[in-house]
């Protein structure tokens, strides 16, 4: 079907005539929530632009530990997919539809043709690539050097007064072990900052959590 990239991706509204013709090869797909979009070691055959919904990109270690690398949301592309298409490599992480996703999908040959002929498309792809690489470097810095108590406190303050989440899910978000999260949450509970319930965490002292997150470098 014909597509109008400018409607959901304004930066692509200035595609050159030849590029616009090539982009017409894109098709709109719907991906149900919970679907595996790609997995570690799989070949990459298409370039995906998310119109609506969220894809969670995560890495799973051999010991079963997981970490969320980033999320691809409406108006965004997946930098890992871009990397695989440019480098001719397989995926090195997994992508899961966190919600129902509506997306534009470009076949790999069309993506490469657009990259070769369109300055506008190249600018869009590499601007997104640059932004996501910066985010990933920040994540590496946080995981490698950040204190888990401060990172957990900061994460909780962003979630609202009640967070319906398991300790394992928090561990995946922060890139640490479930036991570490459980131990730290119990410490917060002893201080009166949170209350722990089955499958949820009640935030009781946002100011104290924010203070810990802000005061630890």
Image (spheres, rainbow, N blue to C red):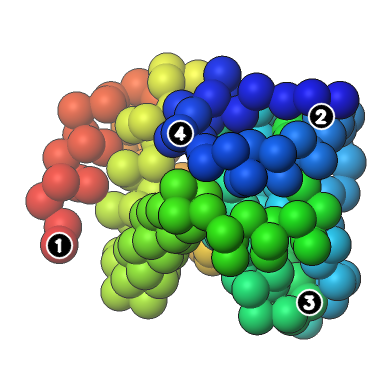
Give the alpha-carbon distance from disc 4 to disc 3, as whole Å: 31 Å
> Is residue 160 shown left or right of residue 36?
left
4 vs 2, front mark: 4
Q: Is residue 110 visible?
A: yes
Q: Residue at x 87, y 71 (%)?
A: 42
Q: Residue at x 33, y 43 (%)?
A: 153
On residue 28, the disc is 2
Nearest to the observer: residue 71 or residue 192: 71
Which numbered disc, 4 or 1, marks the residue that appears first in the sequence? 4
Q: Is residue 155 left or right of residue 78?
A: left
Asked whether 108 or 25 is in front, the reply is: 25
Image position, residue 123 (x, y; %): 41, 53
Q: Position of residue 132 (x, y in %)?
A: 44, 57
Residue linked to disc 1: 217
Return the residue nearer the eye: 1 or 80.
Answer: 1
Q: Relative to residue 62, is residue 2 depicted above or below?
A: above
The tag earlier along the polypeptide, 2 or 3, is 2
Residue 100: image quadrant is top right
């Amino acid at each position: 079907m014909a597509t109008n990239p400018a409607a959901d991706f304004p930066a692509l509204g200035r595609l050159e005539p030849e590029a616009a013709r090539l982009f017409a090869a894109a098709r709109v797909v719907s991906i149900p929530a919970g679907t595996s979009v790609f997995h570690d070691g799989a070949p990459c055959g298409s370039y995906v632009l998310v119109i609506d919904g969220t894809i969670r990109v995560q890495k799973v270690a051999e010991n079963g530990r997981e970490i969320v690398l980033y999320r691809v949301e409406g108006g965004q592309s997946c930098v890992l997919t871009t990397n695989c298409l440019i480098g001719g490599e397989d995926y090195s992480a997994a992508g899961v539809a966190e919600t129902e996703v509506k997306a534009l999908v470009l076949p790999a040959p069309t993506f490469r043709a657009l990259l070769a002929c369109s300055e506008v498309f190249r600018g869009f792809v590499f601007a997104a690539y640059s932004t996501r690489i910066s985010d990933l470097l920040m994540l590496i810095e946080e995981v490698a050097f950040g204190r888990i108590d401060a990172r957990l406190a900061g994460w909780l303050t962003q979630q609202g007064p009640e967070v319906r989440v398991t300790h394992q899910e928090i561990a995946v978000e922060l890139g640490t072990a479930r036991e570490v999260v459980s131990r730290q949450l119990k410490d917060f509970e002893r201080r009166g900052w949170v209350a722990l319930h089955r499958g949820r965490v009640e935030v009781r002292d946002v100011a104290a959590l924010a203070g810990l997150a802000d005061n630890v470098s």
